[in-house]
């Protein structure tokens, strides 16, 4: 073990970022604007404010300011669980016999168990500041719903969560954490909304998707006075809030003069990945540094690796704006895999543009391989990782083993976005040998993409 690099690199409270980093300001090719599906024209602030909080709309549309100040009330909340540690995985390095140095940014040290609290507290703050009664949202595996229920309880807001049905059934304890914090949790698609009833009729017996849950949450928001919709990933405003992860990571690495060679994150909607990589991607764009950045997604929902870069609906019910992104089609219903937070048909417009520009690369991995890596990590490093995070662990191990073959001492950094203690049904399936891999056929993906709206580029 090195005498100069500690197991855990901690920052002080004074080193919590004072501003979020907006990578769009440095991007030469800006992400394409959200479009009104009726007119085909870019969404205006007034149109978006019917669904979202006003300040969040301003952040969503801002592609010029590189730094956006974090309000003191949000920073004070951050101090309860931030800064999060950057951990040197010495035990994993030794077990793998690799000359690589492996680091992970651990975001699981809060009651929500994940990075999601970074954005939920910001969105709840702006909702409260606007004088709203409450907010509605969707959640996949439940980390976002849990984080938002905590944030709403803190600010005294009503919280209504539409949870993807398969996760609602697989993860009852995470559902109960949300209810403990005062949230109303509804399995999606439900029969309580018009769009939910429509989806159930079109896809009988469906296990749901994030796209379905988004549709229901948006309908619930616009049909109740004093409510707005908030989103846990995909949108640029969410990715912006998550840049506290990357900024802290960079500060910790700089403290010990560590330059990462490879930066890895799991990718579902793109907010945690984007939050981790944004400061590093900015350096690449500005010509200051060069890194290998890898987005890792499930083979069952491979939007980057097998999707198309086109305008598509952000939700299954087609009530949201159109976003240009790598997508599998808004009607694509992923197999009910256990990484619920990655079961989204598309990818953040920012991440999609970075991928299209070659700033980042992407890989897809199968579910059983992911859980093999998760089990190895748990046994060696002592943390039970979330299934989502385990996608990044899988590729980090792959890259470390490549270094073993070549003898290269690369610095590998990955995001450990949360813990898996409420994902024991998934681990049980893996341990019992009943877990299956599902990879969609080209025909399935092509059929779904054929239904994407035709938008003049």
Image (cartoon, rainbow, N blue to C red):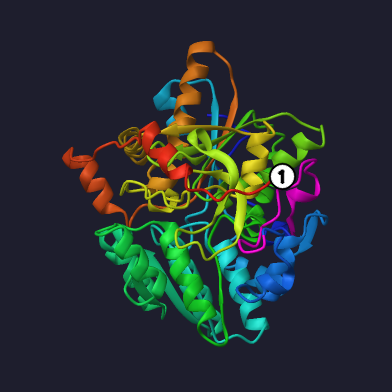
Is residue 126 placed above or below 333 in the rendered structure? below
Q: Is residue 255 visible?
A: no
Q: Is residue 332 left or right of residue 40?
A: left
Number of marks in the image? Answer: 1
**320 up-or-down from 433: above or below:** below
Residue sitting nearer the eye, 111 or 329: 329
Q: Which residues are magenta?
A: 18-39
**Residue under the image location 54 percent in, 64 percent down:** 117
Residue depicted at 30% across the width and 64% down the height: 201
Q: Which of the 4 image quarters holds residue 71?
A: bottom right
Q: Image check: 172 left or right of 442?
A: left
Q: Is residue 260 magenta?
A: no
Q: Residue at x 51, y 85 (%)?
A: 224
Magenta-colored segment: predominant secondary structure: loop
**Image x and y of residue 359, in percent:** 68, 33
Q: Residue at x 34, y 58 (%)?
A: 208
Q: Is residue 50 left or right of residue 190?
A: right
Q: What residue sits right under mark 1 in the picture?
A: 279
Q: Is residue 38 magenta?
A: yes
Q: Quadrant of the C terminus?
A: top right
Label 1 environment density (alpha carbons within 10 Å; few <14, some 14–19, many ≥20): many
Residue at the far top in the pictured view = 406
| Image: 130 above or below 334 | below
Q: Position of residue 131 (x, y in %)?
A: 64, 87
Left or right: where 318 falls relative to 340 = right
In front of the other: 286 or 197: 197
| Percent coordinates x, y for residue 394 in the rendering | 42, 33
**Numbered disc 1: secondary structure:** helix
Q: Quadrant of residue 168?
A: bottom left
Q: At which x and y percent is residue 321?
A: 60, 61
Query: Can see residue 206?
Result: yes
């Amino acid at each position: 073990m090195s005498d100069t690099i500690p197991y855990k690199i901690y920052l002080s409270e004074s080193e919590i970022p004072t501003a979020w980093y907006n990578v769009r300001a440095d991007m030469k090719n800006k992400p394409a604007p959200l479009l009104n599906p009726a007119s085909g024209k870019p969404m205006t602030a007034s149109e978006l404010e019917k669904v979202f909080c006003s300040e969040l709309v301003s952040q969503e549309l801002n592609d010029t300011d590189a730094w956006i100040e974090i309000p003191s009330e949000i920073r004070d909340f951050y101090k309860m669980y931030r800064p999060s540690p950057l951990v040197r995985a010495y035990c994993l390095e030794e077990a793998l016999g690799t000359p690589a140095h492996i680091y992970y940014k651990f975001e699981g040290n809060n009651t929500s168990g994940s990075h999601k609290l970074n954005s939920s507290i910001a969105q709840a703050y702006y909702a409260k500041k606007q004088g709203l009664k409450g907010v509605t949202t969707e959640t996949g595996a439940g980390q976002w719903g849990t984080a938002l229920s905590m944030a709403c309880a803190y600010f005294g807001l009503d919280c209504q969560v539409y949870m993807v049905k398969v996760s609602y059934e697989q993860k009852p304890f995470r559902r109960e954490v949300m209810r403990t914090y005062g949230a109303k949790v509804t399995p999606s698609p439900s029969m309580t909304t018009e769009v939910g009833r429509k989806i159930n009729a079109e896809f009988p017996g469906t296990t749901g998707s994030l796209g379905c849950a988004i549709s229901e949450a948006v309908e619930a928001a616009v049909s109740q006075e004093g409510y707005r919709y908030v989103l846990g990933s995909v949108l640029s405003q969410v990715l912006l809030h998550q840049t506290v992860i990357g900024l802290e990571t960079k500060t910790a690495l700089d403290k010990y003069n560590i330059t990462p060679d490879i930066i890895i994150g799991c990718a579902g909607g793109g907010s945690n990945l984007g939050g981790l990589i944004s400061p590093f991607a900015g350096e690449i764009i500005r010509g200051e540094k060069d890194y290998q950045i890898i987005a890792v997604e499930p083979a069952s929902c491979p939007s980057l690796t097998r999707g198309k870069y086109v305008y598509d609906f952000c939700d299954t019910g087609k009530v949201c704006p159109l976003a240009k992104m790598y997508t599998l089609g808004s009607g694509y219903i992923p197999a009910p895999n256990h990484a619920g937070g990655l079961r989204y048909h598309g990818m953040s417009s920012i991440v999609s543009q970075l991928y299209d520009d070659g700033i980042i690369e992407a890989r897809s991995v199968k579910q059983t391989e992911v859980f093999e890596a998760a089990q190895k990590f748990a046994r060696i490093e002592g943390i039970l990782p979330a299934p989502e995070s385990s996608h990044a662990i899988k590729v980090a191990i792959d890259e470390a083993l490549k270094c073993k073959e070549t003898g290269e001492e690369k610095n590998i950094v990955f995001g450990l976005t949360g813990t898996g203690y409420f994902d024991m049904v998934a681990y049980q399936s893996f341990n019992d040998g009943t877990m299956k891999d599902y990879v969609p056929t080209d025909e399935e993906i092509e059929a779904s993409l054929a239904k994407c709206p035709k938008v003049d580029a």
